[in-house]
Amino acid sequence: AKARIKNTGWQMAPTWVITGENASQSGVIPNKPFDPDKNHWGALELAARWSELTIDQDAFPTFASLSTSAARAQAWTLGLNWYLNRNFKGVVNFTQTRFTNGGPGGADRENENVVLTRLQFVY
């Protein structure tokens, strides 16, 4: 079988550096890098994201089944980023994804909740 399938997706991801530093594509550089002896704790950034993926209805049922594959996924995320210095960052995110279809008999699959953490070294 052959078909032209057009899936669509988008996301919106605002952030706010609550300690006042400038945010950029390359991250945040703390004005006061982590140094507990000086009472410096780095920079904190709050993050949010809303995203959606919609699968073309022409994909069903030839290429995917509504009983095992979601036709749509919507997700929201809340996160906290901690920039200890210009080279080290810690991240904690909570994400919930809601699905349309993908469950038994084409019912909606259960929501998916996940907590993700990451320590990142940049050089």
Image (tube, rainbow, N blue to C red):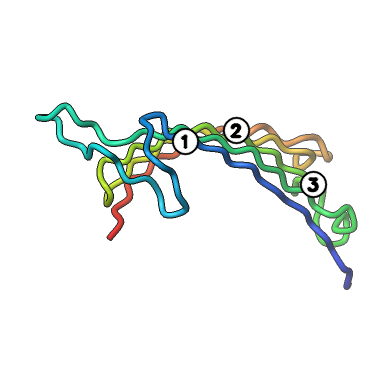
Closer to the observer: label 2 or label 1?
A: 1
- Residue placed most toward the observer, 102 or 28: 28
In the rendered image, residue 79, in percent from the top left (x then y), is placed at 47, 34
Q: Is residue 77 above or below residue 23?
A: above
Q: Residue furthest bottom?
A: 2
Label 3 residue SS: strand
Residue at 75% over, 45% down: 70
Type of amino acid at the residue the image marks with label 1:
Asn
How many neighbours does mark 2 have within 10 angstroms: few (below 14), some (14-19), or many (20 or more)?
some
In the rendered image, residue 67, in percent from the top left (x then y), is placed at 79, 45
Residue to which mark 1 is pinned: 93
Q: Quadrant of the N terminus?
A: bottom right
In the rendered image, residue 100, in percent from the top left (x then y), is placed at 78, 38
Type of amino acid at the residue the image marks with label 3:
Ala
Residue at 60% over, 33% down: 96
Residue to which mark 2 is pinned: 96
- Residue placed most toward the observer, 121 or 106: 121
Label 1 residue SS: strand
Residue 43: name its quadrant.
top left
Mark-to-mark CA distance, 3 and 2: 17 Å
Mark-to-mark CA distance, 2 and 1: 10 Å
Earlier in the chain: of badge 3 and badge 2, it is: 3
**Image-based side of 76 in relation to 45, left or right:** right
Marks 1 and 3 close (CB-CB < 8 Å): no
Marks 3 and 2 close (CB-CB < 8 Å): no
**Image-based side of 61 in relation to 122, left or right:** right
The label on residue 71 is 3
Type of amino acid at the residue the image marks with label 2:
Gln
